Image: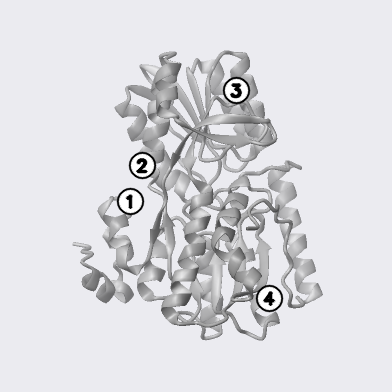
Amino acid sequence: MLGATRIEDIRCRSQHSPQLWKDDHAHQENRARGRRAGARLVLAACGQNAAAPSAPAESEAPTGGVKVGVILPETESSARWEGFDKPLLEQAMQAEGLDADIQNALGDEQKFSTLADSMLASGVKVLVIASISSESGSAVAAKAKAQGIPTIDYDRLNLGGSSDYYVSFDNEKVGQLQGEGLVQGLEAAGVANPQIIEIEGAPTDNNATLFYNGQQRALAPKYQSGEYTLVGSQKIEDWDSQIGGTTFEQILTGNGGHVDGVVAANDGLAGAIVTVLGKYGLNGKAIVTGQDATPDGLQAILRGDQYMTVYKPIKQEADAAAKLAAALAEGDTAAADALATQSVNDPEGARDVKSVLLEPQLITRDNVKTVVDDGAVPASDICVAETAAACQELGISAS
């Protein structure tokens, strides 16, 4: 298994165009300098990757009850934060009798810090943070700790930080489901000796590394035995779907236009890859993975362009964060510990963080209805003209 191996950008075996690589690399570097200001451990978003709003409406400050501050990271690479997490967190916090001030840092680390300062000054009893980087998240957690305010890392663990608790999904299991889904799809298609391309998440994202580690539980033995051939593997800066599509096309053309399976780390990257495959008449022929069960990803599965996605019920994540926050707001660490019965190792902080780790689910065409039945995605968002027949066959009704 390659799970313990850190992936530095694994260059594909085919030769890219030097100028294309230079232009793409320069574009990535410019984006990175503007957004990270040198931070080395950006925990980029791995959630819904449909088109995101440019700037979310800010939540009104809490008006009564126990105050809890929640800071979400950005909107640029992922629509999940405003479209799913924010409303679900609002509902969950309200159900626990909390007044949550939920704000989005819009990918700006200075804004992230300023929001935290403002929330701490306003008297919040708990801080819930989905950070932009481990550096900024850890700095905020340290400020809160100095004031006696407990902090919950939400979705992303701040490596080297001091947050009291962590709520997320089992991210290595997410990757394992992606690897197993790829194998399942290739076996169902009867593909012998398949050639695989891997398009992974951000190189500075700890979650992306965990996804990769999980994928390799299923795929590394196949590569090592020669049953599968790894054509190329590349991490994508900031989970940028446009860069992901361009990088995939370079690897694909460098391999003579041949690919049998693609590990796409999330649905946004998968969508860009499907577009490229369509350009070469390969959509629906190559097995493509994904993650997040986005409307676009689910539509692609119903069309036959994408084989699978990973569904992470964000409502469960929001509910768990709210229950933890409620216990900590009352100073009841025993109740919080009873909720956070798992732990995640923070290698940079040399500590184990008390955690709530939720179970992801593998979704293929046969169980897309699960996501709809859970209320995560409305049927009307996936049962469009080109998927209507599939929806009818699977008993998914948009009416």
Query: Which x, y percent locates residue 153?
Result: 54, 33
Q: CA distance from mark 1 to mark 4?
A: 35 Å
Q: CA distance from mark 1 to mark 3?
A: 33 Å
The colour style of the image is one colour
Question: Which badge, 4 or 3, is on the more N-terminal residue?
Answer: 3
Q: Kindly indicate whether the residue at mark 2 contacts the one at mark 1 (C-beta within 8 angstroms).
A: yes
The residue singled out by tag 1 in the image is 376
Q: Nearer the viewer, residue 239 or 355?
A: 355
At label 2, which amino acid type do we have?
Answer: Lys
At horizontal 75% and vertical 55% (from top left) the residue drawn is 29
The residue singled out by tag 3 in the image is 117
Query: Which x, y percent locates residue 156?
Result: 55, 40
Image: 253 above or below 242: below
SS type, badge 4: helix
At label 4, which amino acid type do we have?
Answer: Gln
Q: Rate crowding at label 1 as few (under 14), some (14 to 19) or many (20 or more) other CA atoms within 10 Å.
A: some
Q: In the picture, residue 306 is in which quadrant?
A: bottom left
Q: CA distance from mark 1 to mark 2?
A: 8 Å
Question: Which badge, 1 or 2, is on the more N-terminal residue?
Answer: 2
At label 1, which amino acid type do we have?
Answer: Ala
Question: Which badge, 2 or 3, is on the more N-terminal residue?
Answer: 3
Question: Which circle, 1 or 3, is nearer the viewer?
Answer: 1
At horizontal 60% and vertical 52% (from top left) the residue drawn is 208
